[in-house]
Image (spheres, helix red, strand yellow):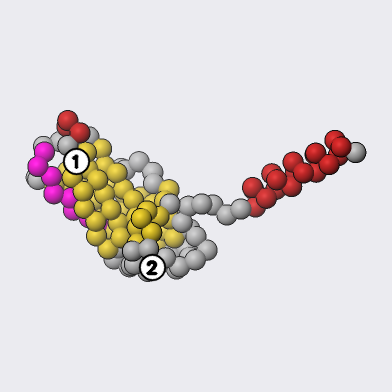
Amino acid sequence: MKRFLVVVSALMVVGMAVAQSSPYRLRVLSWSCQAFARGVLIQGTVRNISPRPLQDLRVSARVIGPGLRMAANSAPLQDRNLMPGESARFELRVRTNFDSVSRCELWFRNPRVIQIATLVPNPR
């Protein structure tokens, strides 16, 4: 009887964990990070994968150069409010004072949340 209860309890816990929705609210479908003279242009598309609307969205980026020098910026999305399943384009320019770019980091936020959980693939 004890084994049966342990097995049933374990199955219930696993079932509840599987049934929970994803912690991610946004998914970046594609994006690029292209260096130009004195800066970087970041462009892409993001989709709301949560069951709720997201409002006042901003894209934020950090560009890391040689010697761990950094530059950052943020800008509102073209469509600042995303309903579940909707996608929006984003574009952001980050001015830098270094010649080469080692890495670009991307995230999203709104006035109520410091950072929105987002699935971000590597840039193309």
Helix, strand or loop at mark 2: loop
Q: Where is residue 41 in the image (x, y as percent from the top left)?
A: 20, 50
Q: Which mark is residue 70?
A: 1
Q: Say left or right for 6 vs 98.
A: right
Helix, strand or loop at mark 1: strand
Q: Say which of 117 and 1 sits in front.
A: 1
Label 2 sits on what residue type?
A: Gln
Which residue is denoted by mark 2 in the rendering? 55
Q: Where is residue 114 in the image (x, y as percent from the top left)?
A: 36, 55
Q: Residue at x 35, y 41 (%)?
A: 122
Label 1 sits on what residue type?
A: Met
What stretch of residues is rendered in magenta?
A: 91-98
Q: Residue 48 carries which label?
A: none
Question: In which quarter of the view is residue 91 placed?
Answer: bottom left
Q: Residue at x 65, y 52 (%)?
A: 19
- Quadrant where the N terminus is found in the figure: top right
Q: Say which of 5 and 73 sits in front.
A: 5
